[in-house]
Amino acid sequence: MPLEKPEDFGTNGDGTPNDEFCSMCYQNGAFTEPDISMREMIEKVAHMLEKHVKLPKAKAEQIAKETIPKLNRWRSYGTEYL
C-alpha cells in the first residue's frame, strides 16, 4: 500500500506514525494479523488489488508475489513460503 496520506501509515505503540508499515497491517505498535502467513498475505493483497484497483486476477497475483516478499516483515521468510 502506498504510504502517502497520514491515515495510510501504521502507528507505533506511542501513537506516532510508523513509516514502514501501513495502517491496515500495523496499529498501536503491533501487526493487526500477527499470525497471518506470507502466502495468506499474498492472497489477501492480490484480492484487494483485484477488488479496489480493478486489476485482472493474474496481474494482481503477480504484483503481490513480487512485492510482499520484499517487505521487511516477510523478507526473512524466503521464497519457500510462496
Image (tube, rainbow, N blue to C red):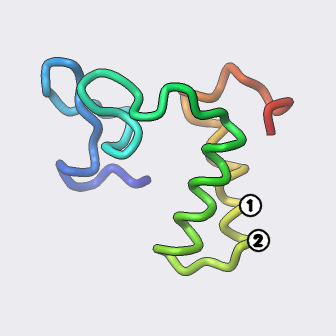
Q: Residues within 10 Å of mark 2 (few under 14, many from 20)?
A: few
Question: Which of these two is toward me, 75 or 26?
Answer: 26
Q: CA distance from mark 2 to mark 1?
A: 6 Å
Is 73 situated above or below 41? above
x and y, in percent, of residue 9 in the image: 27, 42
Residue 33 against residue 29 in the figure, above or below: below
Q: Quadrant of the C terminus?
A: top right
Q: Amino acid at mark 1?
A: Gln
Asked which secondary structure carries label 2, the reply is helix
- Any mark on residue 58, and which? 2
Please tell me how crowded label 1 is: few (under 14), some (14-19), or many (20+) other residues with Cα within 10 Å.
Answer: few
Say which element carries label 1.
Answer: helix
Tally of numbered discs:
2
- Asked if disc 2 and disc 1 are in contact, CB closer than 8 Å, the reply is yes
Image coordinates of residue 51 in percent, x first then y, are 52, 74
In the displayed structure, does residue 19 sit left or right of residue 61? left
Residue located 77% across and 26% down the image: 78
From the viewer's perspective, tell me whether residue 30 is left or right of residue 14: right
* Residue where numbered disc 1 is placed: 62
For image coordinates 13% across by 27% down, the residue present is 15
Q: Position of residue 37 (x, y in %)?
A: 65, 33
Which quadrant of the structure image shows residue 27?
A: top left
- Left or right: 53 in relation to 9: right
Residue depicted at 47% across the width and 33% down the height: 33
> Looking at the picture, which amino acid does disc 2 mark?
Ala
Q: Which mark is residue 36?
A: none
